[in-house]
Image (cartoon, grey):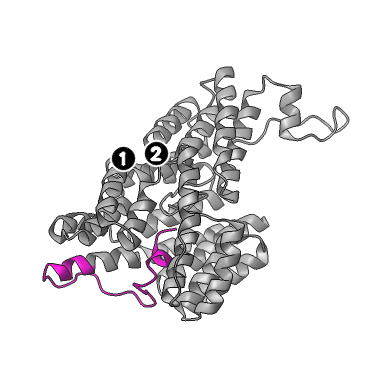
Amino acid sequence: MRPLLPAVGLVLAGALVFTVLAVSAPPDPVPAAAEWPAETLQQRLKRLPGDYRGWARLGIQYVEQARVTGDPSYYAKAEGALATAARLDPRDDTVLTGRAALAAGRHEFATAAELAGQAINANPYSAAAHGVLADARTQLGDLPAADRAVNEMLALRPGVAAFARASYAAELRGDQDRARTFLEYAHDDASTPADLAYTRHYLGELALHQGDLDTADRWYTQSLEAQPAYTPALAGRAAVAALDGRLTEALTLYESVVQRLPLPQYLIEQGETRIKAGLAADWSLLRAQRRLLEEAGVRDDLTWAEFEADHGDPARAVRHARAEYARNPNLMAADALAWALYKAGRPKAALRHAEQATATGWRNPLVRHHRAEIERALGRPARTGPTPGFDPDLPALARPS
């Protein structure tokens, strides 16, 4: 899932949640400057505590801050703001969309889909609600419904957020050319440094997962030129360096990445790069982040299934993967369950889930590698070939972003 979010602890290594900030309804008309001086949203809410849409927008901003900073404590702030909005008007589409965005950030995708559907019933023209619905349906494994939501969003408000979702939908179907085309549309439409950084980063991700390290690095570099503080692009440059064998450079870059944004995905990438360089991995910060996310109400069995399968206890990986798949039977969860079962010595049980993970034609290199290894263990010819540039010692670098 592309994080608006996305990714989350958000992702984060599995969340395809996008922020609704770029696609939410425009604010109410602002009176002339002579009527009152410029004010923050918090100041406006002190003056107008009954502004339910203002409370909803504040909640949405807190959800976005959780993504940008990696600080899950913003979820509690978002919950408080959105609860106030819901008390004032529980049926407003902006309020419902904000609540859906919070649920998605916490990986409660069934709840997110339900709330987004209610928002659409209240206002069928809400591009933001269709966007959150698309993200949630993708995570729930209902790709046809996700495609319908994306198409509605494209019709209502074509732009960066809609094109990015359309790109990801095409990527999940294995149509990499169309995925790139939609991202190029998004890049052409980008008008702010943040949007330029975002679209260039994901163009880099597409190139990285196709093994084109030079093109990937070029896009990541241009992303940082647009917004030097955009940490995902810095992580992309670290990944390119690691895959290119420049491990000292990669570790230096990862140190900067995790100091800025200590998300589980980046901490795992850093640890795997240390192991590749012959150093010991220190997972203590990763475990601390896991506790913080759990305390904030984020359920991320997907990340922990993948981590335990590669670096911990395969039996625990199976438990996490089954829990994730039961809630969100998407392609990523199917792949995680397949790999966990394989690492636990059960390749026959794993094959069915590996086949599901590749059934749409999705060409993610890690997913293809997992299926090939499972088929090899069963004495069958692998139906998925290797991807150029993929390194099985650095699996986190090929995980969906």
* Mark 2 secondary-structure assignment: helix
Mark pair 2, 1: CA separation: 8 Å
Q: Is residue 192 left or right of residue 157?
A: right
Q: Residue pushed farthest right?
A: 34
- How many numbered circles are shown? 2
- Residue 230: give x, y in percent of width and height: 62, 60
Magenta stretch: includes residue 36:
no
Which residue is at a point 74% across and 24% down the rendered structure image? 46
Q: Which residues are magenta?
A: 372-401
Q: Earlier in the sequence, mark 2 or mark 1?
A: 2
Q: Is residue 255 visible?
A: yes
Q: Are circles 2 and 1 on residues that touch, CB within 8 Å?
A: yes
**Vertical comparison of 101 with 275: above or below:** above
Marks 2, 1: nearer the viewer: 1
Q: Give the labeled residue for mark 2.
A: 109
The location of residue 353, given as percent across then percent down, is 21, 54
* Horizontal relation, residue 374 to residue 220: left or right: left
Q: Secondary structure at mark 1?
A: helix
Q: Which residue is mark 1?
A: 327
Q: Nearer the viewer, residue 40 or 320?
A: 320
Q: Is residue 401 above or below residue 10?
A: below
Q: Which mark is residue 48?
A: none
Amino acid type indicated by mark 1: Arg
Q: As drawn, which residue projects farthest toward the bottom?
A: 245
Check disc 2 and give the amino acid type: Phe
- Residue 348 in the image: above or below residue 299: below
